[in-house]
Image (cartoon, helix red, strand yellow):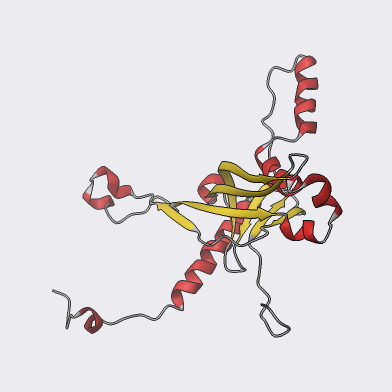
Amino acid sequence: MSGPMSPRVLKAGIVLIDPDSGQVQRVISLQYNPDSLQREYAIASHGDGGERSEAMRLKGPPVETITLEAEIDATDQLETSNGTALELGIHPQLAALEVMVYPASQALQSNLALASMGMLEIVPMEAPLALFVWSKNRVMPVRVTSFSVAEEAFDANLNPVRATVSLTLRVLSVDDLGFKHRGGSLFMSYLANKEGLAARSPSGTLSTLGLERLP
């Protein structure tokens, strides 16, 4: 049980910002930090073609994919008679995540109005820029590529009160956004921070590998 001297546990979450102004539109903190985080890298290498001169060259940043499961539970709120939880269960928390993969209803209505006026080319709707935050050392622009919800318990009005959300996020790099895009600059900060962390990792010696010198 945590006490007065217990360290404050940071929350992981997603921040939605305006891609032009950088203004924060919404902060979605996960109720419980996931127990595990899976990260996968698809390496962008020139060497895949088999040319000897290209074997050591990288075409750009790898495609990094993050997979996680987040638990959402209204038990504590129900025990304290939280009005929103009593009325809606965890609908609001789920909806805050779900709207990330929907275009805004206002934008859909606007495109409908333009189409009815005879506009043949409708500009695709740009969503807010999503940043996945896992401590100050990992703040990265992402796009949700897979989203699923397993609702596991309900109240008497069939409001969900416990659920597991599975998210797959693709980290967006300068190859996706360009260097001038706000997300591109955030990716470069993420990469620079990663390089700084790598520099602080202790370097081994050949002897620790059982070698006196390289062959």
Q: In which quarter of the image is the C terminus?
A: bottom left
Q: Is residue 48 left or right of residue 213?
A: right
| Residue 95 location (% of width, % of height) | 72, 43
Q: Residue furthest left?
A: 215
Q: Give the residue displayed 66% in from the left and 31% down from the top.
A: 124
Say which of 4 and 29 sits in front: 4
Q: In this view, does 137 lie to the left or right of 41?
A: right
| Residue 153 location (% of width, % of height) | 66, 46
| Residue 68 location (% of width, % of height) | 53, 53
Q: Quadrant of residue 50?
A: top left
Q: Give the residue displayed 82% in from the left and 50% down from the top.
A: 86
Q: Which residue lies furthest to the right in this view?
A: 83
Q: Is residue 128 above or below residue 135?
A: above
| Residue 140 location (% of width, % of height) | 58, 57
Q: Give the residue displayed 75% in from the left and 35% down from the top.
A: 104
Q: Quadrant of the N terminus?
A: bottom right
Say which of 38 and 113 sits in front: 38
Q: In this view, does 5 lie to the left or right of 215?
A: right
